[in-house]
Amino acid sequence: MAGLICFLLALPFLAVLGHDVYIAYGRAEEDYMMILETFQWSDLGWLWVQYAPDSYDWVKASLNPAVWEGVVGPLLEQTAALVFAVPALVVYVYLIVAKLVGLWPYNGDAALARKSKGNYAFDRTDKPKGSFKYKRH
């Protein structure tokens, strides 16, 4: 479960990083050393306007102008990689601390493993040692 959460949180960051590298690669043309010179981080708002302008206009018209100017506007001016990396890093740090301390989602794993032990037909850990003796009745 924790691995799936980490993977899903990493996807938006990796997509933005791949997009920015692709754009820099396209600008560099034949001189690949120029990639580092032309590399720029995309803003979240620019990505939204560039690739989904209709939804941008709809959300801007739907929200209260005070909310747009106070919350959404400053967020859209931020670098997209940073906007997606911060929540992922917060969850990663929490999962590391939770693993060390034994908080959710790691607190139930040991109890679940103990509870399910012996429920399988081929689990021989609880069987007596020695050879199997078949007795015909």
Image (cartoon, rainbow, N blue to C red):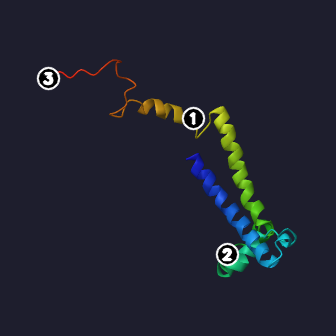
Residue 115 badge: none
Task: Work out whether residue 130 or residue 97 is closer to the camera in this orientation and state it.
Answer: 130
Which residue is labeled 3 in the image? 136
Question: In the figure, residue 96 lies in which quadrant?
Answer: top right
Q: Badge 2 local density, few (<14 within 10 Å), some, or many (20+)? A: few
Image height of 66 relative to 103, above or below: below
Which amino acid type is marked by label 3? Arg
Which amino acid type is marked by label 1? Asn
Query: Which secondary structure, mark 2?
Result: helix
Q: Give the mark, 2 or 3, whose residue is nearer the N terminus.
A: 2
Between the residue at mark 1 and the residue at mark 2, the CA separation in whole angstroms equals 41 Å
Residue 107 badge: 1
Residue 59 badge: 2
Q: Residue at x 35, y 22 (%)?
A: 127
Q: Give the mark, 1 or 2, whose residue is nearer the N terminus.
A: 2
Question: In the figure, residue 57 lies in which quadrant?
Answer: bottom right
Image height of 60 relative to 127, above or below: below
Which amino acid type is marked by label 2? Val
Q: Nearer the viewer, mark 2 or mark 3?
A: 3
Between the residue at mark 3 and the residue at mark 1, the CA separation in whole angstroms equals 47 Å
Query: Which secondary structure, mark 1?
Result: loop
Task: Work out whether residue 64 or residue 37 is closer to the camera in this orientation and state it.
Answer: 37
Q: Are marks 3 and 1 in contact (CB under 8 Å)?
A: no
Q: From this viewpoint, which residue is outermost toward the left?
A: 137
Query: Which secondary structure, mark 3?
Result: loop
Is residue 94 in view from this perspective?
yes
136 vs 40, left or right, is: left
